[in-house]
Image (cartoon, rainbow, N blue to C red):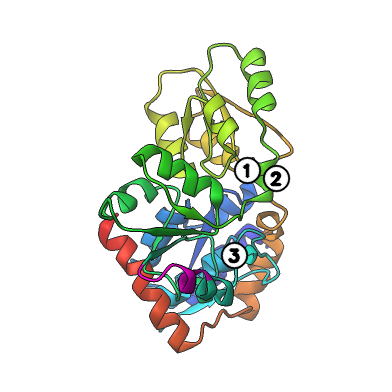
Amino acid sequence: MDLNEEIARLKRERNAVVLAHNYCRGEVQDAADFTGDSLELARRATQVEADVIVFCGVYFMAETAKILNPGRKVLVPDPSAGCPMADMITAAQLRELKAKHPGAKAVCYVNSTAEVKAECDICVTSGNAEKVMRAFAPDEEILFVPDRHLGSHIAGLLGRSYTLWPGYCPTHQIVTAKAVADARAAHPGAPVLVHPECAADVRAAADHALSTGGMCRFARESAAPEIVVGTETGILHRLRKENPDKAFYPVSDRAVCPNMKKNTLQNLCESLREMRVEVEVPAETADRARRAIEAMLAVA
């Protein structure tokens, strides 16, 4: 029995569902029951009826699934698949920042730990940040953590000023404005899409700054035969699979997240076979973090 067959068998036996992020390896995406971006996966996690969720992504995503499903078993194939951006702020650092800005609303990108979410009023994803942030009154002070690039992108769209934590995604730092210019020269006429986690000069050089879910929608709806994509290269698998009549090119083929790639068919199969590694979030932290996540889902 090959790995795909064993995974399918184990999913039936365990009454398990596999969720995978768009940045995972193509073969892992193909083995998943649902593939999406952070917003899509958060929404799907609220709709799960299986007994077991296996989350192929990075650890904070599995934490979010556990927070939204406290009575279900949530597994991760590799618990060392972390997120450098999420690790750039701690709950203690956020409490210190809040103490310096009494009365301010704390907003966290979903790419953050459960402990940081628990200190926030609301979460956002790259796919819903603009809509969520429009819900704040114009005179409300906003603390936006941990990604300075997404925060500055939304602040610019809304004509606002936020206090930004200086976090960033190392993988998206690889995507540069020069790389965008080079990609335009190599593929003249092709629209260039980049992720909001890219730096401001990269976003300015592109045609659109979109979440990976937004990129998938754009690709479906666009008449362009070629599209250049500036984000983690795992998304190219889904784009090509869903749009076989179109060509997709990376702004940089070096934009690879080593943590996302820790999810493999082998450790996915082992996770189901051995029912490990289980994700746990302390009840008090989970309760407080759930409020921030559910506040987000209620808006967008």
Of residues 112 and 260, the one drawn nearer to the viewer in this rendering: 112
The 10 Å Cα crowd at callout 1, few under 14, some 14 to 19, many 20 or more, is many
Rendering coords of residue 175 (x, y %): 66, 36
**Residue 277 sits inside the magenta stretch:** no
Tag 2 near tag 1, CB within 8 Å: yes
> Disc 2 marks which residue?
256
> Disc 1 marks which residue?
232
Q: Quadrant of residue 296?
A: bottom left
Residue at 56%, 25% (x, y): give it.
205
Give the Cα separation between the discs numbered 3 and 2. 25 Å
- Which mark identifies residue 7? 3
Between disc 3 and disc 2, the foreground one is 2
The 10 Å Cα crowd at callout 3, few under 14, some 14 to 19, many 20 or more, is many
In the rendered structure, which segment of residues is drawn in magenta?
97-103
Please count the marks in the image: 3
User: Which of the two labelled residues, at mark 3 and mark 2, occupies the earlier sequence position?
Assistant: 3
Of residues 167 and 52, the one drawn nearer to the viewer in this rendering: 167
Give the Cα separation between the discs numbered 1 and 3. 26 Å
Q: Give the position of the N terminus as an image quadrant.
A: bottom right
